[in-house]
Amino acid sequence: MTALLRYRTDLLLRSQRWLAPVLLYAVFLGVGVQAGEPVLGALGYAAAALLPVTAWLVRICLGQEPSAARHVVAAAAGRERAHLAAVLAAVACAALLGVVAVLGVTAMSDLRHADPVRAGTAGLLAVTACVLTGAAVGALTTRPLVRSRGWSLAALVLASLLALVTPGSPARHAVTALVTGSRTATVTLPWPALAGALALAAAATAASTRATAWRE
């Protein structure tokens, strides 16, 4: 699995397809996060914006190989392992992006009403919850479950929006905890949201991984 992860990550970086979602995320942060604003609200915005970016990265990793190369990798390592490695590579890249965002946002925001360590921890937990939820969205809205590129993109955008606004969504719960904490000057660590996002991502990834056995 380590070799597969290295291969998937290298393929993503060399393709430069990561530039579009990463630049979009940078634009989101540049427009939506201003220096000196309350740290928890800024972290909530940074976490929420990472959800569709993660879904996009998963979609890229699952569809970037030519058919011939995909079949060769599947024959050598197994379809399910290759599929899982693609999802994990995207999640790792999105998580790294989230960590950088949390550090940057925390450094430039107003920390007068929040402990920086606890606020940063809450931000990391929210970012992780949004990354995992975004991974679930990406896994369910691209191949092998949705093969059409047009329908896949439409489903990804709609599912990302729903994941951010639907009551009961782990990502919504994590972001709401930060935004509410910004208003009340109370830092709440969104552990339940993280647990829910982990379960959702595991279920979605398992479903899409198993589908490779009969749809690829």
Image: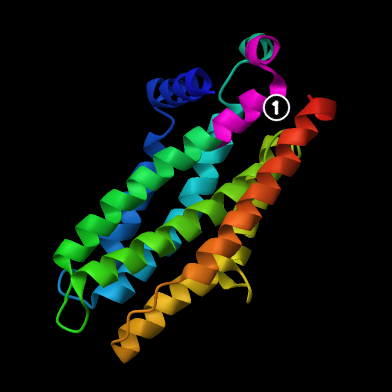
Q: Quadrant of residue 144?
A: top right
- Left or right of 156 in this view: 128: left
SS under mark 1: helix
Is the C terminus in the top left, top right, bottom left or bottom right quadrant? Answer: top right
Task: Please say whether residue 141 is visible from this viewpoint.
Answer: no
How many discs appear? 1
Is the N terminus in the top left, top right, bottom left or bottom right quadrant? Answer: top right
Please give the name of the residue rendered at 57% of the width and 59% of the height, measured from the top-left corner: 197
- Work out whether residue 203 or residue 169 is closer to the camera in this orientation and state it: 203
Q: Where is residue 2 in the image (x, y as percent from the top left)?
A: 48, 23
- How is the structure coloured here? rainbow
- Left or right of 122 in this view: 66: right
Crowd around label 1: few <14 · some 14–19 · many ≥20 (10 Å): some
Bounds of the magenta segment: 73-87
Please give the name of the residue rendered at 41% of the width and 34% of the height, measured from the top-left corner: 18
Q: What residue type is labelled 1?
A: Glu
Please give the name of the residue rendered at 54% of the width and 47% of the height, measured from the top-left corner: 55
Q: Position of residue 71 (x, y in %)?
A: 69, 12
Can you say whether 10 is above or below 183 in the image? above
Residue projecting furthest to the bottom: 184
For mark 1, what is the residue?
80
Q: Where is residue 26 in the image (x, y as percent from the top left)?
A: 30, 51
- Left or right of 195 in this view: 36: left
Q: Position of residue 58 (x, y in %)?
A: 55, 39
Task: Please say whether residue 135 is visible from this viewpoint.
Answer: yes
Please say whether residue 206 is one of the residues in the magenta stretch.
no
Q: Is the magenta stretch mostly helix, strand or loop?
A: helix
Please give the name of the residue rendered at 27% of the width and 71% of the height, measured from the top-left corner: 118
Can you say whether 86 is above or below 126 in the image? above
- Work out whether residue 79 or residue 115 is closer to the camera in this orientation and state it: 115
